[in-house]
Image (cartoon, helix red, strand yellow):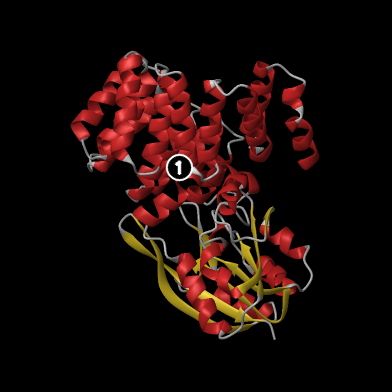
Amino acid sequence: MTDDIDNEQDAPAELSLGEALGLALRLHREKAYEGAEALYRRIIEAAPELADAHHFLGVLCHESGRSAEGIASIRRAIELVPDFPGFYNNLGNIHMQCGQLAEATACYGRAIQLAPDDANLHNNHGALLKAEKRFEEAAASFQRAMALDPGNVRAYNNMGLLHAAQGQTPEAIRYYCESISRIPGHPEAHKLLGLTYYSLGRHEEAAEVFRQWVEVAPEHPVARHMYAACSGQGVPARAADDYVEYTFDRFASSFEEQLNLKLSYQAPQLCASALARQAGARRGLDLLDAGCGTGLCGPLVAPLCARLVGVDLSGGMLDLAATKGVYTELTKAELTEFLLGQGQVWDVIMSADTLCYFGDLRRVVAAAAGALKADGLLVFTVEQADDGATPDGFRINPHGRYSHTRGHVEAVIRAAGLVLLEAGEDSLRTEGGKPVQGLVVVARKP
């Protein structure tokens, strides 16, 4: 990939500005962020008044976790072309995702002034009003979007979410169904409707929604995974690679906000605390952050490390992990296969909230044991299942994650030749207003 990027960076000298911008956009869509950014900057250097280049560079910076830089770049585009609604819309989207609601309000308001008949602008403004709990105004915005574009399924889905936020479940279901009827293969409405039934404990109905989704979109990874989770049919040994990539690439930009503000996410802190207890005075560690996501564990453990490497299947997550500035190296790979390719090179392998996407833990824990140095530590969390109600030691749940019994965890630790040091119970996050109980596990390689 690096060679390709280097070649692309030479392109502005050989292509017209329009061709170069098209090439940068293609790299951007393919998530070749380094090459796209270099090309955007070369274009701006050659044509500093080209507003589109500033705008797309701003979007890329935000997607790479540098939202303040992205906002500044889009504001420069607006200075150059003050009356283009799309610039204000994307700037509003960034402000909203950053929780800067007043700024987002101003941007969406200006965009609607410039393009009052754009259904997407009214839909985005409605989502902002919903976030501000201005429910009646939000409903009016969504209704306006639907009137302008009856096929705008995002507006129907958002109206469903608005009713759900007010506890009006039947109305939410009606809008999700309306969305599905308009575009049967559209993923979001199926997912929202299925999860709504799940939250009500109506698991058979949830499974039927996901079955219908598989029927119209058999290759969609979320449809397949959620149907298996709700129906118990064709349950995979672990979440498939394409499911993980699809889910977390799309979740990346709002991942930390969702977990920290809405779910009281604790797994990274619990793992870091467990490591501190067991590592004692050890420093200069070679540590693998296994399933690093956006890098929430990295800053917590970096002071203990001489080498800190992250591995994850989601390129979008890895792009944000890079912005933490603490990782020696970041690698896109499936976790078990990555571990099997390592020698005994790690003092610590830490996996916060990743093994909940695996069923039977024997293979991944054995691979981790093989990659640890003597006296190395394996630190991880799992969601806890009841031993008596889970005869296999693990199960997939209707929300799509696996939970594991204490007995299963202890058995796989022993089978891998590790010594269990601790397996304390704690709350990993909240879900539906209730704590998700888990085990925080530390094992040592003799």
Between 427 and 216, the residue placed more toward the observer is 427
Give the percent coordinates (x, y) of residue 120: 39, 22
Between 98 and 162, the residue placed more toward the observer is 98
In the image, what residue occupies the spot 67% across and 61% down?
328
In the image, what residue occupies the spot 54% across and 53% down?
294
Residue annotated with mark 1 = 68
The quadrant holding residue 106 is top left
Q: Is residue 363 above or below residue 54?
A: below
Q: Is residue 390 visible?
A: no
Give the percent coordinates (x, y) of residue 411: 61, 78
Give the percent coordinates (x, y) of residue 364: 67, 66
Q: What amino acid type should be assigned to the residue bearing mark 1?
A: Ala
Q: Secondary structure at mark 1?
A: helix
In the rendered image, the quadrant that contains the C terminus is bottom right
Q: Is residue 50 above or below residue 431?
A: above
Give the percent coordinates (x, y) of residue 319: 59, 47
Q: Is residue 275 above or below residue 131?
A: below
The quadrant holding residue 263 is bottom left
Count of marks overlaid on the render: 1
Residue at the left extreme, as displayed: 136
